[in-house]
Image (tube, rainbow, N blue to C red):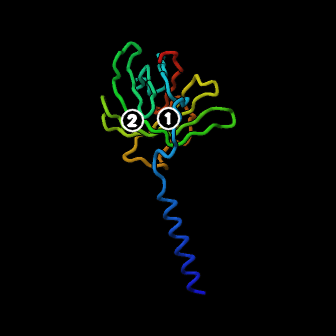
């Protein structure tokens, strides 16, 4: 009896270790036409982050480009962007958890994880971001609740490609 209990306990512990250690970023396989992809703009000042928020972001498969001004022809910085998780809530809003690293420009090497909500209409993108040392599924922001949060920003879908 003790042998079976020992084997069962060892099995449960092994399974727990495998499940807890199995989180790897990027398990979601993006579609070519993700709602996140495209050009998003905002020329008004937004919350406390207004100084740092670019006026335009272009989300492409695997990357995001940011432009300080709408008129800029070249991005001020570029970053990798991977979709970790995607879901749709009861109201029809689309949610993403993404992670990325700035690869060019100001703050090169900065790593962050974002919680993004795209409105049911697909025209409004709201997000909160947190800086991380290393990617960790437990470090995503938990909610988008306060537009005055210094890590909050909002963009509107642009017809520009």
Picture coordinates of residue 128, whole percent (x, y): 50, 34
What numbered label is drawn on residue 128? Answer: 1
Looking at the image, residue 116 sits to the left or right of residue 66; the answer is right
Residue at image point 63% right, 37% down: 88
Residue at image point 52% right, 75% down: 10
- Could you tell me which quadrant the N terminus lies in? bottom right
For marks 1 and 2, give the one nearer the viewer: 2
Q: Nearer the viewer, residue 19 or 140?
A: 19
Q: Which one is earlier in the sequence, the residue at label 1 or at label 2?
A: 2
Looking at the image, residue 87 sits to the left or right of residue 70; the answer is right
Q: Nearer the viewer, residue 130 or 35?
A: 35
As measured in the structure, the alpha-carbon distance from the residue carrying label 1 to the one carrying label 2 is 17 Å
Pick out the residue farthest to the front: 32
Residue at image point 34% right, 27% down: 77
Q: Nearer the viewer, residue 154 or 109?
A: 109
Give the secondary structure at mark 1.
Answer: strand
Placement of 130 over or under 122, stated as above or below: below
Give the secondary structure at mark 2.
Answer: strand
What numbered label is drawn on residue 88? Answer: none
What residue is pinned by disc 2?
A: 80
């Amino acid at each position: 009896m003790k042998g079976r209990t020992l084997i069962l306990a060892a099995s449960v512990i092994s399974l727990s270790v495998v499940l807890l250690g199995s989180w790897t970023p990027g398990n979601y396989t993006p579609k070519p036409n993700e709602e996140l992809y495209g050009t998003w703009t905002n020329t008004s000042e937004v919350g406390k982050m207004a100084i740092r928020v670019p006026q335009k972001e272009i989300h492409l498969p695997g990357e995001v480009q940011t432009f300080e001004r709408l008129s800029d022809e070249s991005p001020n910085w570029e970053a990798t962007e991977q979709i970790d998780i995607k879901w749709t809530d009861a109201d029809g809003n689309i949610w993403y958890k993404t992670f990325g690293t700035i690869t060019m420009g100001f703050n090169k090497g900065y790593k962050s994880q974002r919680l993004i909500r795209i409105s049911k209409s697909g025209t409004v993108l709201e997000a909160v971001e947190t800086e991380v040392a290393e990617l960790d599924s437990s470090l995503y922001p938990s909610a988008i609740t306060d537009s005055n949060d210094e890590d909050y920003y909002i963009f509107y879908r642009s017809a520009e490609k």
